[in-house]
Image (tube, rainbow, N blue to C red):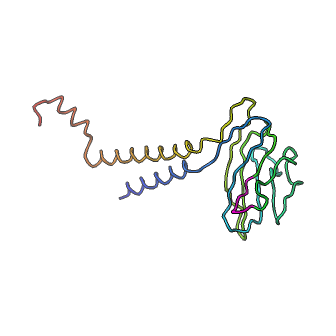
Amino acid sequence: MSASKSTLSVFLLMCFLFCSVSEDKTVKSGADVTLHCQSPRDEDITSLKWIRPDLKTDEYIFFFRDNRTYEHFQHPSFRGRVQLMDPQMKNGDVSVILKNVTINDTGTYKCRVKVSNTKPELMNTIILTVTDSGQTSEGNVGLKAGLPVVGILLVAAVVGFVFYIRLNGCPFQRVLRRAADPQQV
């Protein structure tokens, strides 16, 4: 029984580690990019913070509180270049548009939303890459969603194989014994 509990624990840990979703975006320098984020629908959004942790500053990419934006809390390189995609934030859409991106905008962006009397929650993480080449993509969301599933299936197959071997013995050993002693049935 303890083997199945430990297997379940390993399975849940693997799911937790590999199932988190982030979005990769690659855009060409000079383009505008939408950084998507969705908060709970029909909730009163009391604050919205878009941050970039790698900047190592207290300033925000975008900051909204008490039904208004605060541009003076923005990092200087983002002032005048970030706006809400939907200023009314209908259906919890708190996506922002970052205009005229440059190579310096490459980094990890995090969206944190606070609704009513709760702590701010991380809603989305976007890894943005800005290139000078003509190659762009909207992220391999299908690939990112599929890889964790493959990993979980692989872990489940290995765990299943280990249990099979424990219960039935190794089938390869029987084949080797028969090959070594053909008279054994």
Q: Relative to the observer, which residue lies in front, 91 or 115? A: 91
Q: Classify residue 101 as left or right of residue 158.
A: right
Q: Classify residue 94 as left or right of residue 184.
A: right
Extreme residue in the left direction:
183
Compared with 124, 103 (above or below) is: above
Quarter that holds the N terminus: bottom left
- Please state the total of marks drawn on the protein image: 0
Q: Position of residue 36 (x, y in %)?
A: 69, 51
Q: Position of residue 179 (x, y in %)?
A: 18, 29
Q: Which residues are magenta?
A: 89-95
The residue that appears at 59% across and 45% down in the rendered structure is: 141
The residue that appears at 48% across and 47% down in the rendered structure is: 149
Q: Classify residue 184 as left or right of residue 136.
A: left
The quadrant holding residue 172 is top left
Compared with 119, 175 (above or below) is: above
The residue that appears at 72% across and 29% down in the rendered structure is: 133
Q: Classify residue 7 as left or right of residue 65.
A: left
Task: Give yes or no for residue 168 being in the magenta stretch.
Answer: no
The quadrant holding residue 65 is bottom right
Quarter that holds the C terminus: top left
The residue that appears at 46% across and 52% down in the rendered structure is: 11
Q: Position of residue 132 (x, y in %)?
A: 75, 30
Extreme residue in the bottom direction:
117
Q: Relative to the observer, which residue lies in front, 63 or 28? A: 28
Task: Give yes or no for residue 94 being in the magenta stretch.
Answer: yes
Q: Position of residue 162 (x, y in %)?
A: 35, 45
